[in-house]
Image (cartoon, grey):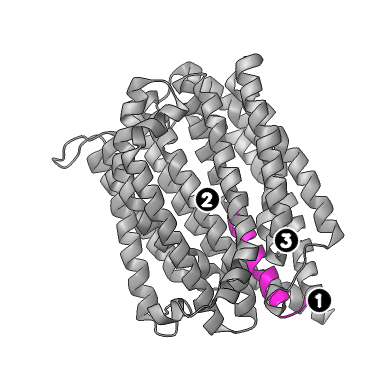
Amino acid sequence: MNNIIKRNKAFINTLIVIAIPVVIQNVISIGLNMIDTVMVSELGENAISAVGLANRIYFIFTTICFGIYSGAAIFIAQYWGAKDTVSIKKVFGIDLIIGSLLSLVFSITVYFFRIPIMRIFIDDAYVIQLGSEYLKVIAFSYFFTSVSFAFSFNSRAIHRLKMPTIINAVALLINTFFNWILITGNLGFKALGVEGAAIATLIARVFEFIALIYFIYKDKTHPLAGSVKEFTSWDLTLLKKVLKTSFPVILSETAWSVGTSVYFIAYGFMGSYAIAVVQIAFNISDFFQTLFFGIGNASAVMIGNEIGKNNVDNAMEYSSKFVKITLVLSVVLASMLLITRNIIIRYFNLEPATSEYLSKTLIVYSLYFTPKMFSYMFICGILRAGGDTKFCMVVDIITIWFIGVPLSFFSVLVLHLPIHLVIAAVFSEEIIKSITVIKRYKSKKWMNNLIMD
């Protein structure tokens, strides 16, 4: 009995240490997007649509970065369990190089092709113009974001989360302040509209980058505070080993982010109001999901650490506990979203008809909340921690591209459904995904010790 109590206490303590800072980081990040959307809503629904569509590119970029860093973090978590800091710096160096190169590709593409990119999503000259103004500025933020994200994300795998969380909080305050003075014009500044929102975000990202680099390298013992030599000391064998596991994650996240962005092309046929509804619903839903982002990260780190120590029984016990936690919390938070949706909607400056559509769309989000969180927990928190990245990739690609995407266009162009029913049809892929990953979990084929291979 005493051993069980000790194990449960150790589990809860580690969960809190990892999950709470990640939850705070995500609340800050999503809060930043929410504040942007609320402030931009003062400019009208076209502005919300423009920023929402422009940020689909940022969403794709950060999701691919998440794929790169979470794939490599599987190794970092397992190396941390084995107390191998030399290998941690090598893998982190691979992260930084790939992430930085990706950011340059996105920056150049977005800056020079911002108008054609906006035209992919919508055929509205005014929305395209507003979106291109936003992208022109935000294109310069991608490099700072990629490096900051790499340091912040991998700090989770080594249980060093306090400083990144504080820096994220300060960045949110900076972004909010500059939104206030630049979007509508305050303290004598010119009102810049959506361009002001982009400038505020860029300033916050640059601050975050500088602060993270400074404080991590100020601590000489920090496992991520490596030299250029340490970051580039990996050989081809290690690179192939990391990419073998990471590439399916990268491909999976890319397929998912691009696929969900293709949904927006279908929504664009319905007009700017539909984009505004989905963008706001997306932000609100994300806010309610922040707790799971923390628990999912804790799951990946804790299970990865145990697998790295060859404690297979502990890893399985942990995964079972995370499944139960996900079930209970998803039902509670789905109920909260359903009950509070109309109160939240009041903070956005929307037409009455758009508010009604948003309310119905949030009902759909709440009904699909539990299967969505199960899919997230199993794919990002459990299966990937065991190195089962290829299976996760296949599931993501099939459910998004062969179920979700066709249903989005069929619902809009053939059935002519209202936006909330289109969302309901699209989200049906989450049910299939959750059933599939639960079966995989029960088979135990997902559990692999990568650093012992």
Q: Which mark is residue 388?
A: 3
Q: Is residue 448 left or right of residue 145?
A: right
Res 444 quadrant in image: bottom right
Q: Which mark is residue 370?
A: none
First-in-chain label (2 vs 3)? 2
How far apart marks 1 and 2 lie (CA) works out to 38 Å
Disc 1, SS: helix
The residue at which mark 1 appears reads as 4
Disc 3, SS: loop
Q: Kindly tell me whether residue 401 is visible in this rendering.
A: yes
Q: Which mark is residue 63?
A: 2
Going 56% across and 43% down the picture, which residue do you hit?
Answer: 257
Give the label, 1 or 3, closer to the camera: 3
Disc 2, SS: helix
First-in-chain label (1 vs 2)? 1
Q: Dot 1, crowdedness within 10 Å: few (<14), some or many (≥20)?
A: few
Instruction: Report the span colored magenta.
Output: 293-311
Residue 440, image x, y percentages: 81, 54
Residue type at mark 3: give it. Asp
Going 56% across and 48% down the picture, which residue do you hit?
Answer: 254
Residue type at mark 1: give it. Ile
Residue 337, image x, y percentages: 61, 38
* Residue 298 part of the magenta segment: yes
The one nearer the camera, 21 or 219, is 219
